[in-house]
Image (cartoon, rainbow, N blue to C red):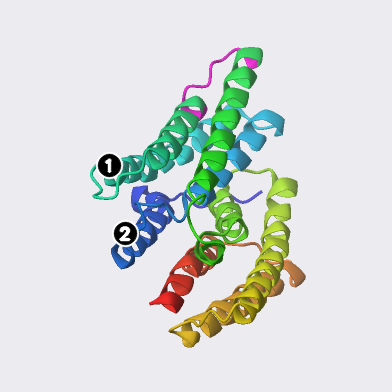
Amino acid sequence: MSEQPKYGLLLSLLPIMLLAAVDIFALYLQPYAKALPHLSVAVLIAQLLCIVVFVKGEICNGQRARLIKANLYCLAYWIVWLILSLFSTYHYILTDIVCLCGIMLTIAIWQQPQDELMRRSILILGALLGGLGIVTYFFLFMDIPPLNFLQYNFFAQLISGILLAHLLLLIARNRLQGFIALLPLAAAATLFINALVVLGLLVYAQSSAVIFSNELAVSLYFLLHLVCAAILAIFIFRKWTFDYYSLFLLLFISASFPLWMTFAYL
């Protein structure tokens, strides 16, 4: 088996920096939005998928150590967002809770004990904290109109989370090929579901006489779905191995979905 390429600090950190940058730009566009992290669920989902690998995957100590290190890069995202939340004019305590859940999840992955039973217990606790973070995230929308789901919807974040998990496994040079092969299929299926959900909400918006100020942004939103679907289909049907740059491009496109829906309202 050929040796997988190693990635330096910059390339390893770049996917997390991308998600943080998208969130900060979205906050700049809507400073009144109570410092809501658009992509926090994506990061939590990626980390939860890594926990599945830690708990169920047959990986050696070297792979485990590399995947732990790759997960540590997620800590940068949570620290950035916690600082943004604490010092935001529109400070919201639930955002703090989401960030703290992400930080504790990352620490649970980082501080895995040698004892297998104890390690499994710590990871399950981390998974519960990640689940709590996701549930808390959706409590942020109790006082937000339903159509804002277009900007923050779960399925768009699920796509980014799956792609980020794939990138983390690639950076960690993980060799669970069976599990890794399922991730593009899961991303493609979620992409299709997201398009259907958003289309349904747009039909509802039209029936409710909601007018988008920038219809071009809505058109680009669906066009980018087609671009992602085409890239995924080419790699899947030709049985090509996803490399860092193809996954990063897909992550970049999927992470931009909330922005296009934000532009639609501006």
User: Which numbered disc covers residue 83?
Assistant: 1
Secondary-structure class at tag 2: loop
| Residue projecting furthest to the bottom | 216
- Identify which residue is drawn at 41% across, 52% down: 37
Q: Is residue 187 above or below residue 117?
A: below
Q: Residues within 10 Å of mark 1 (few under 14, many from 20)?
A: few
| Residue projecting furthest to the front | 208
Task: Name the residue tied to disc 2.
Answer: 32
Image quarter where the C terminus lies is bottom left
The residues tagged by marks 2 and 1 sit, at their Cα atoms, a distance apart of: 17 Å
Looking at the image, residue 230 sits to the left or right of residue 134; the answer is right
Residue 119 visible? The answer is: yes
**Which amino acid does the dot numbered 1 rest on?**
Ile
Q: Is residue 6 above or below residue 125?
A: below
Nearer the camera: disc 2 or disc 1 = 2
**Mark 2 vs mark 1: which is more N-terminal?**
2
- Give the magenta-colored segment's residue range: 109-116
- Identify which residue is drawn at 55% across, 66% down: 147
Q: Residues within 10 Å of mark 2 (few under 14, many from 20)?
A: few
Pinpoint residue 103: horizontal percent, then vertical percent.
42, 33
Pinpoint residue 26: horizontal percent, then vertical percent.
36, 63
Q: Main secondary structure of the magenta part?
A: loop
User: Which numbered disc covers residue 195?
Assistant: none
